[in-house]
Image (spheres, rainbow, N blue to C red):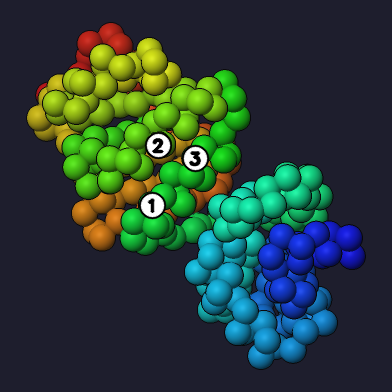
Amino acid sequence: MRDTQSSLEYIGLKPKEAKIYLALLELGEASVVQIAKNAGIKRTTVYNILPDFINRGLVTSTFKKRRKVYFVEDPRSLKNDIKEKGNVIDRLMPELLAIQNVIPSKPRITFYEGLGGMKELYQDTLDNSKEGETILSYTGLSDFSDLMPKEYADYYIGERAKRKIRLRVIASNSPTAQSWKNTAIQDLRDIRIVESPNFRFNADMEIYANKVALISYRENFLGVIVESKEINQMQRAAFELMWGSLESGRQSQ
């Protein structure tokens, strides 16, 4: 553990930050009191450091039985926070993932706000999908294309294709949806369009790994990721049902 702490300090975390990060990684989820005890650091110091971790996307907080608890985001988020010394992070990542205490008994819910939050959310769909896997998506597309900066939309589409992660998308009918048909092969994308005007998607959903992400572009960029195997499987089943109905041409009017 000491070597891991030294590596975290080398890539930019201060000594107390590294201790708190490792303590929370090992605990899975914990209150400030539990973190302070495990890390051997004063509670006031933990209180001061955690908000900065949250702002950097390294830690998330939630309430459990009226008590505020914290948990570490996917350790791979360190790559987004620290741009330099990438080789050290790559060597360190397997050890961090091994330390991480993942609690499977309850869904983990993470909220994202603003344009920066949306970028983190979409980056999560890439970082948690492996080569050859497929992301399932419902989208209105018009909001994505109109409100997301074009440079980021282009980056995301290109990066997903570069990583050889496929996309199957069910989209509301729009000029953007129709144009996506023309680039389906090069962008590793299969798209089926809901022609009926009675079915319009005013928010997006991404189904991947063991997670489901919901995104609203109209509420000042608001998103949430639910990490739950059961919820993910249910949404996959619903997606496949709708996908099959579009394939056979049986669309609700």
Q: How would you rate the neighbour count of disc 3 (Cα within 10 Å): few for under 14, some for 14-19, many for 20 or more? A: many
**Looking at the picture, how far across and down is residue 197, in whole percent?**
10, 30
Picture quadrant of residue 73: bottom right
Q: How would you rate the neighbour count of disc 2 (Cα within 10 Å): few for under 14, some for 14-19, many for 20 or more? A: few
Q: Residue furthest top?
A: 248
Q: Amino acid at mark 1?
A: Met
Q: Secondary structure at mark 3?
A: helix
Q: Which mark is residue 118?
A: 1
Q: Amino acid at mark 2?
A: Tyr
Question: Which residue, given by chain and number where applicable, does mark 3 sit on?
Answer: 125
**Looking at the picture, how far across and down is residue 235, in whole percent?**
43, 35
The Cα–Cα distance between marks 1 and 3, rounded to whole angstroms, is 11 Å
Q: Residue furthest front?
A: 84
Tell me if residue 17 comes above or below residue 148 in the rendering. Answer: below
Tell me if residue 154 comes above or below residue 68 in the rendering. Answer: above
> Residue 195 versus residue 129: which sits nearer the camera?
129
> Residue 243 versus residue 185: which sits nearer the camera?
185
Q: Which mark is residue 155?
A: 2
Which numbered disc, 1 or 2, marks the residue closer to the eye? 2
Q: Amino acid at mark 3?
A: Thr
What residue sits 34% from the left and 60% below the top? 114
> Residue 69 versus residue 15: which sits nearer the camera?
15
Q: Earlier in the sequence, mark 3 or mark 2?
A: 3
